[in-house]
Image (cartoon, rainbow, N blue to C red):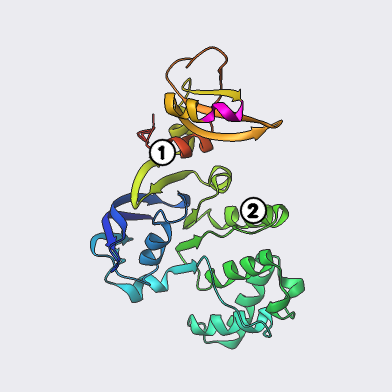
Amino acid sequence: MQLEIKNLSKRYAGGTQALQDVSLSIPQGMFGLLGPNGAGKSTLMRTLATLQEADSGSATIDGIDVLRQKDEVRRLLGYLPQEFGLYPKVSAETLLAHFAQLKGIENAGERRDVVHALLRQTNLWDHRSKPLGSFSGGMKQRFGIAQALLGNPRLIIVDEPTAGLDPEERVRFHNLLSAIGENVVVILSTHIVSDVSDLCRNMAIIHQGRVRAAGEPMGLVAALNGRIWRKPIERSLVADYQQRFQVISMHLFGGRNVLHVLHDAEPEPGFEPVVPDLEDLYFATIKGYSDGTSN
């Protein structure tokens, strides 16, 4: 099973070009869609989830036209948007059962079994009778995944699922997503680099509505081998280095600014080589310093 997206474009009424000729082949398993806020990720996710129209282009999965056969797509879709509302006074079990009925699971016994299985799968069984308003952020996200899994979907879309979660809940959520992604297409849209590096076998970086890089994370990162250099400098020198070199990122360590620079050889004395990682690729790509090709 594979999702094929070809030349998808979307411009909003105000003139913002949210997507421009986006083409991706998304295979079975976890696929990371990485990009900064406003890059076009959510527009792409909402379009694939049949919630808005594209101006041009196509998307197909298993022979189904995603843009035109919306009812067919919804039968195989599970969707966890970036923000979703819950009835705070309703219990998790009651609301999930209601969603199951809306999803077409009419038989009461079957519906009960499905709901109970999903509550166990998402580690919410012990909290099934509690009102959703008492849930933590991570528990609400796990409930969101439970409702997205109703009906055995073959395409699951999760939009910024770990934003705002504490480290423990992020680990729980990662483990849950990893288990789900074994047999279906799961698109994980995020601006958190570690989510993609931890979970995804394939990925794309989107920026300003365009796909800037696509492929296997390790292959994409390997293209930067021998080209990332690091140097701690005083704050007063930052502007000078940014003018002279392709500075892809900067962070504080021990009170000093540490620059990561993209250069084919040692930029100047004092730099040391760095083994590149996905964060280096991400920053190099969105700043236009990397061509986003995979070896």
Q: Nearer the viewer, mark 2 or mark 1?
A: 1
Mark 2, secondary structure of its residue: helix
Which residue occupies the extreme right position in the image? 126
Which residue occupies the extreme left position in the image? 56
Q: Earlier in the sequence, mark 2 or mark 1?
A: 2
Point 64% across, 57% down: residue: 173
The rendered magenta stretch, by its main secondary structure, is classed as helix
Vertical placement of residue 102 versus 219, above or below? below
Instruction: Write down the residue under mark 1.
Output: 287
Res 98 quadrant in image: bottom right
Magenta run includes residue 2? no
Residue type at mark 2 is Asn
Point 47% across, 38% down: residue: 283
**Horizontally, is 260 left or right of 123 in the view?**
left
Residue type at mark 1 is Lys
Instruction: Please state the horizontal and vertical placement of residue 95, each as a whole percent of the image.
Output: 61, 82
> Which residue is nearer to you in this view: 114 or 187?
187
Which residue occupies the extreme top position in the image? 269
> Which residue is nearer to you in this view: 256 or 72?
256
Q: Which residues are magenta?
A: 234-238
Vertical placement of residue 221 versus 139, above or below? above
Crowd class of label 1 (few under 14; some 14 to 19; many from 20; radius 10 Å): some
> Which residue is nearer to you in this view: 189 or 113?
189
**Horizontally, is 171 left or right of 108 in the view?**
right
